[in-house]
């Protein structure tokens, strides 16, 4: 009995569920049908609007093409008018040019005649000018040669005069130095006597010797710059050397530096002077302002010198 009731209940429930499902499916189908109908109506409406727009487009295109055609025809007419006007102006210019060319031909013929006359005149003037130029050049060359010869002669005369004057001055200087050496020799004799009597060397009074050394060095500096062939110079050099040897015998050494190469480390006061007469890089002692004097091997006066530096 229970099984029968259960089967009846299941069948009843299944029928109710099937009825509900069929009812929902029918509603869904109806809704879809309504949407499809609505879309078809919208499509029909769009199609109608497109046809309307297409008709409008065709009308506008036809009007636009007509306007373009009218504009092109107007432009062509304008160009034709401009071309005709240009042709007329070119014809007028051509006529003017022909007239100008004829006038120019006449002027050219006239100018050619004038140029021919002028050329003949220029040929004559050119010939005169060439002759005048050649004459001027020859005259200038002759004057230049004469002046050069005169200047050379004057230069030689001046150089000869300078050389002779220098030689004369050097000879006079030698004569004066010779007299001074005689005086210094007499002083040396006096010095020897005083040294023997008063023992001056022991008193360390070197003033007289230093003065004599300064004089002798000044003379040697002048002799260094003189021409070796100067009259009386050799005898004077020997006399100076003799005086220095006499002082050396008394213990005084006057150090010779003139003409020697300067070396670093010398105990001297030196002035350096650039010179173009000295070989580049060399340093030569060319002047003694004060000589170095030693007494019994000990320096009693430092040298003051002038050094020429080759550039």
Image: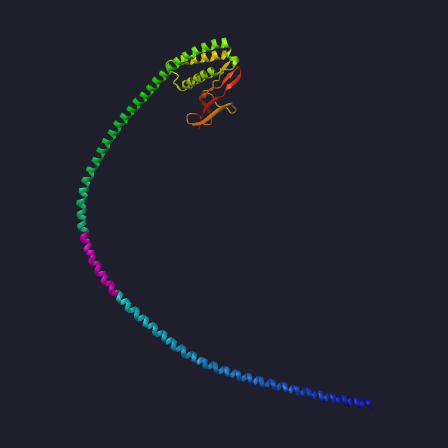
Q: Quadrant of the C terminus?
A: top left
- Residue 11 in the image: x percent, y percent? 75, 89
- In the rendered image, the quadrant that contains the N terminus is bottom right
In reply to whether residue 170 is colored magenta, the answer given is no
Residue 5, image quadrant:
bottom right
- The range drawn in magenta is 87-107
Of 287 and 155, nearer the camera is 287
For residue 65, side relative to residue 87 (left or right): right
Residue depicted at x 50% and y 83%: 45
Color theme of the render = rainbow
Q: Is residue 279 above or below residue 190?
A: below
Along the line of sight, the residue nearer the viewer: 258 or 15 = 258
Rendering coords of residue 243 (x, y %): 45, 12
Q: Is residue 99 magenta?
A: yes
Instruction: Report which quarter residue 123 is drawn in.
Output: top left
Above or below, 108 against 150 in this view is below
Q: Which secondary structure type mostly characterizes the magenta part of the structure?
A: helix
């Amino acid at each position: 009995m229970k099984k029968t009731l259960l089967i009846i209940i299941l069948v009843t429930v299944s029928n109710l569920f099937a009825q509900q499902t069929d009812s929902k499916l029918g509603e869904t189908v109806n809704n879809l049908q309504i949407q499809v109908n609505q879309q078809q109506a919208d499509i029909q409406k769009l199609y109608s609007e497109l046809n309307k727009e297409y008709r409008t487009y065709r009308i506008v295109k036809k009007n636009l093409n007509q306007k373009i055609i009218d504009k092109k025809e107007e432009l062509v007419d304008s160009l034709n008018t401009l071309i005709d006007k240009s042709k007329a102006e070119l014809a007028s210019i051509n006529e003017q040019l022909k007239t100008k060319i004829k006038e120019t031909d006449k002027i050219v013929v006239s100018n050619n005649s004038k140029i021919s006359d002028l050329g003949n005149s220029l040929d004559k003037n050119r010939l005169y000018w060439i002759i005048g130029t050649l004459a001027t050049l020859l005259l200038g060359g002759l004057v230049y040669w004469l002046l050069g010869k005169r200047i050379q002669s004057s230069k030689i005369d001046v150089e000869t005069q300078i050389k002779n004057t220098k030689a004369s001055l050097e000879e006079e200087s030698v004569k004066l130095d010779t007299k001074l050496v005689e005086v210094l020799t007499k002083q040396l004799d006096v010095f020897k006597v005083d040294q023997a009597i008063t023992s001056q060397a022991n008193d360390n009074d070197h003033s007289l010797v230093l003065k004599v050394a300064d004089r002798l060095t000044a003379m040697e500096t002048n002799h260094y710059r003189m021409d070796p062939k100067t009259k009386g110079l050799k005898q004077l050099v020997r006399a100076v050397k003799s005086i220095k040897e006499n002082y050396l015998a008394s213990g005084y050494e006057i150090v010779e530096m003139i003409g020697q190469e300067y070396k670093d480390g010398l105990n001297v006061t030196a002035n350096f002077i650039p010179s173009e007469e000295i070989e580049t890089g060399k340093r030569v002692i060319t002047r003694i302002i004060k000589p170095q004097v030693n007494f019994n091997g000990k320096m009693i006066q430092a040298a003051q010198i002038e050094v020429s530096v080759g550039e």
